[in-house]
Amino acid sequence: MAQLPLVSILTPSFNQVRWLPDNLESVRRQTYPRVEHIVMDGGSTDGTVELLGRAGPLVSWRSEPDGGQSDALNKAFALSGGEIIGWINSDDGYFSTTAVQQAVDYLQTHPDVDLVYGHSAYVNATGRVLHLMWAPRFVRWWFMRQNYISQPTVFVRRRALEDRFVDTSLHFTMDYELWLRLLSRGHKFARIDGVLAFERVQPQRKSFTLTDVLTENTAHLKASYGIVSGGSLNAALLSALGIFSRFMGVRLVRAALDETAYAAPRSRLWELVRRQIAQRRSRMEVGE
């Protein structure tokens, strides 16, 4: 085991005790044997500290005031020792029990690749799969228009991160900024063709509560890295790509019927296909 690369999973958390058990379970059930899970809590008062106290020796954690999610992530990164870094927020987690193993295998057989990502699942408050988010192979022109890399599916080599993890001046698009920064330094990205992680659609999700911050942070990325945003032509292109991605996701539906790394309610195949093809975004966002 000592010859295997250590994988550090970073989790920022603040008053997320409702979702954190699935997060912890999804890491605990990974088949890869060398994983450290570092949870940096911002001083929660909802029972998170008590939950972490019962989490066992595989979870390292602290609970103290911080400057927000980005600051918590950088604190967790500073405590980590892994050659490979993963990042799952407290309401997200790994979908497959082999997510870490798949990432390690790919990185070991592709030494020129520094960041890998995969497909993801949108789940609701109870963990039921709502939608499979198909991610294309890395295409620079597409990526500069849309951040289609699902953050909890990402694994990145520590050597590529150099002096810091995320930009603490950002509170929304810090993941996109990290990918763009690595891309600007010439690091190579690759996709793993598997459903690696889940993102939870819930009312406190930042995409619902911090829309003004998203606008401000996107403007920063446009000025710093030249991403393409706005305009009717770009909107039409992204809409077409969204439809394409939705239908490509149909072939991933069977993965949602397999054993997952967290306690997911079961769905029938026809229900998953119907939601994948026809469920309106507005209904998905409220978790129905």
Image (tube, rainbow, N blue to C red):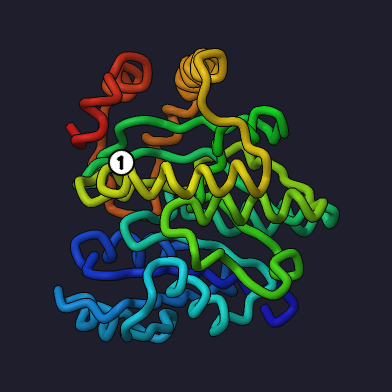
Is 275 on the left or on the right of 132, as rendered?
Answer: left
**In the image, what residue occupies the spot 82% across and 51% down?**
186
**In the image, what residue occupies the spot 36% across and 38% down?**
122
Residue denoted by label 1:
123
Query: What percent of the width, then of the height, locates residue 57?
Result: 41, 86
Query: Is the C terminus in the top left, top right, bottom left or bottom right quadrant?
Result: top left
Q: Is residue 24 above or below residue 279?
A: below
Q: Is residue 248 visible?
A: no
Query: What percent of the width, then of the height, locates residue 253?
Result: 42, 27
Is 142 on the left or on the right of 240, as rendered?
Answer: right
Which type of secondary structure does the marked residue at label 1 adopt?
Answer: strand
Query: What percent of the width, then of the height, locates residue 210?
Result: 31, 49
**In the image, what residue occupies the spot 28% across and 52% down?**
263
User: Within 10 angstroms of label 1, few (less than 14), some, or many (20 or more) residues?
Assistant: many
The amino acid type, in three-letter code, at marker 1 is Val
Please identify the residue farthest to the left as the structure is shown: 46
Q: Is residue 86 above or below residue 92?
A: below
Which residue is at the front of the view, 130 or 172? 172
